[in-house]
């Protein structure tokens, strides 16, 4: 009698089990590689975002704020209002671009970042072109700016989401938030002559506005950051080559990265490195 060949039920189950294990292992490996690739891409994207924002200040790129009215009173910071006869900073004879601030993470959404444009005085209290930070008196173009009494409709800030669930952290991996700015500190001002506006030479400085750990994240609201921006002094600037280390954590691969921002006499630098552990590193 001819015997029948084939797999028993037990053998079939064993084959299916082994195949399932191999499949799960392969998918885990693929997902792990995908997560690492996404993190690497995201870090480069964030690095580019920071570099582009700093470039905006370095190149004098102005925000589009239609109907912006800027008034100067005494020796105070500019008063920003929204009016039908206002204009952009590019054509404003009383205010200039003073700088730009960036906040990574905030009080409620750790995977968001916010950019703030800063306006400053073009003329001092004697109607002479502003030449330094003290007389520039930067102020955030933001609805929460109430010092002085600015119009809440005036806004040049923008909130965006960090890529691939990346978020700022401390060196122990806990959520954090950091805000810094690139601001004109030795501002040679602008002369207004016959309706034409001309700029002179200027120097740009780096400022660490605020940083917060998990216990202090509730204080990192836009309103509080705006208040801190408006409270900056000439002593707030970092020294040349002093670094702001921004630590980031992947939401998928468990990796970390540190983006370092610094400034020197020749310009600013933004660089990054990806790490598996940052416990011994310094984070802002």
Image (tube, rainbow, N blue to C red):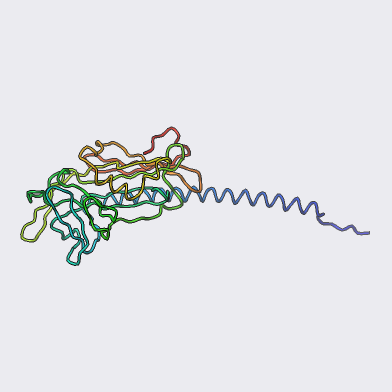
Q: Is residue 249 left or right of residue 198?
A: right
Q: Is residue 132 left or right of residue 156?
A: left
Let me know if residue 56 appears in the view: no
Could you say where residue 2 lies in the image, as x and y percent from the top left? 91, 59
Residue at 32% of width from left, 50% of height from top? 223
Could you say where residue 244 lies in the image, as x and y percent from the top left? 33, 39
241 or 62: which is nearer to us? 62
Residue at 31% of width from left, 47% of height from top? 225
24 or 98: which is nearer to us? 98
Could you say where residue 25 lies in the image, as x and y percent from the top left? 62, 48
Q: Residue furthest top?
A: 280
Q: Residue furthest bottom?
A: 84
How many badges with numbers are in the image?
0
Could you say where residue 50 lies in the image, as x and y percent from the top left? 33, 49
Residue at 61% of width from left, 50% of height from top? 26
Quadrant location of the C terminus? top left
Let me know if residue 2 appears in the view: yes
Quadrant location of the N terminus? bottom right
């Amino acid at each position: 009698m001819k015997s029948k060949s084939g797999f028993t039920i037990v053998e079939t189950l064993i084959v299916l089990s082994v195949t399932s294990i191999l499949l799960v292992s392969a998918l885990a490996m693929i997902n792990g590689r995908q997560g690492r690739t996404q993190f690497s891409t995201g870090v480069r994207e964030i690095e580019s975002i920071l570099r582009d924002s700093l470039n905006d200040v370095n190149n004098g790129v102005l925000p589009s704020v239609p109907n912006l009215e800027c008034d100067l009173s005494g020796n105070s910071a500019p008063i920003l209002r929204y009016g039908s006869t206002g204009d952009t900073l590019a054509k404003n004879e009383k205010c200039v671009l003073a700088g730009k601030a960036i906040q990574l993470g905030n009080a409620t959404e750790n995977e968001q970042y916010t950019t703030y444009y800063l306006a400053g005085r073009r003329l001092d209290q004697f109607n002479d072109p502003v030449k330094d930070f003290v007389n520039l008196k930067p102020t955030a173009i933001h609805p929460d700016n109430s010092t002085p009494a600015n119009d809440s409709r005036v806004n040049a800030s923008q909130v965006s989401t960090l890529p691939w669930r990346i978020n700022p952290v401390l060196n122990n991996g806990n959520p954090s938030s950091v805000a810094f700015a690139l601001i004109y500190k030795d501002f040679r001002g602008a002369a207004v002559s016959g309706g034409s506006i001309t700029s002179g030479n200027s120097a740009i400085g780096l400022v660490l506005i605020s940083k917060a750990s998990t216990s202090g994240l509730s204080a990192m609201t836009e309103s509080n950051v705006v208040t801190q921006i408006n409270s900056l002094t000439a002593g707030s600037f970092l020294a040349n080559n002093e670094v702001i280390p921004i630590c980031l954590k992947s939401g998928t691969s468990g990796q970390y990265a540190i983006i370092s921002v610094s400034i020197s006499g020749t310009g600013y630098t933004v660089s990054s490195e990806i790490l598996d552990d940052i416990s011994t590193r310094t984070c802002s």
